[in-house]
Image (cartoon, helix red, strand yellow):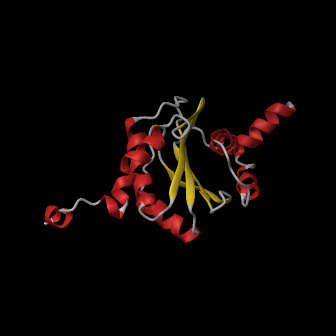
Amino acid sequence: MTEESKFWEDLKSGRFVSMVKESSKGRSVSSSQEVYNILKPIFAEEDDVEKAYFIFLDGQNKVLAIENMFSGSITASPIYPREIVKRLLSLKATSFIMAHNHPSGDIKPSAEDKSITIKIAMAAASIDVQLHDHIIIGDGYHSMADTGWLNGVSRRFSNLLTTHALPANWDEDAA
């Protein structure tokens, strides 16, 4: 077996996963390319199942934890914002990055990908935690932050979370 094929087999076996997770703690992540480089080997472990990983960050954008929170089938993975919020609070994270794989290799975000990103961003923002990015990994990667889509979502809904944005007749409208 060549050195390259042995490395690939070790990578796919998951031998490097715990090493990646442990060595990243306390380190800062500053770009979607870095996130891709960190997570691509983790997704290689079981590349026929859609999984969602989260990188939880402290106030200085240093990694608190990298965790696989959800796994599914070859085409989908259920994601529950409530569980993400619980984990954000327990780790005392101030921000996070979401990443999931598309086993098909297609990195284009689906309507479901966009919908869950909005739900997660809103849930996190309501507890003053920021979603920095949602990255889709396949044949390459797609960053919702790099394309500006995530920033557009944040701008669109930021007024909902500020008290000065409530209309004067808010109480009457709620009744």
User: Is residue 5 positioned above or below 100 on the image?
Assistant: above
Viewer-closest of 175 and 56:
175
Q: Residue at image x 82%, y 32%?
A: 4
Q: Quadrant of residue 81?
A: bottom left
Viewer-closest of 53 and 33:
33
Image coords of residue 6 (percent x, y):
81, 36
Image coords of residue 67 (percent x, y):
60, 56
Q: Quadrant of residue 44?
A: top right
| Total numbered labels placed on residues in the image | 0
Viewer-closest of 73 and 41:
41
Image coords of residue 29 (percent x, y):
68, 50
Q: Residue at image x 56%, y 62%?
A: 94
Viewer-closest of 105 and 115:
115
Horizontal side, residue 30 vs residue 94: left or right: right
Q: Residue at image x 76%, y 56%?
A: 23
Image coords of residue 172 (percent x, y):
14, 65
**Quarter of the picture holding the C terminus:** bottom left
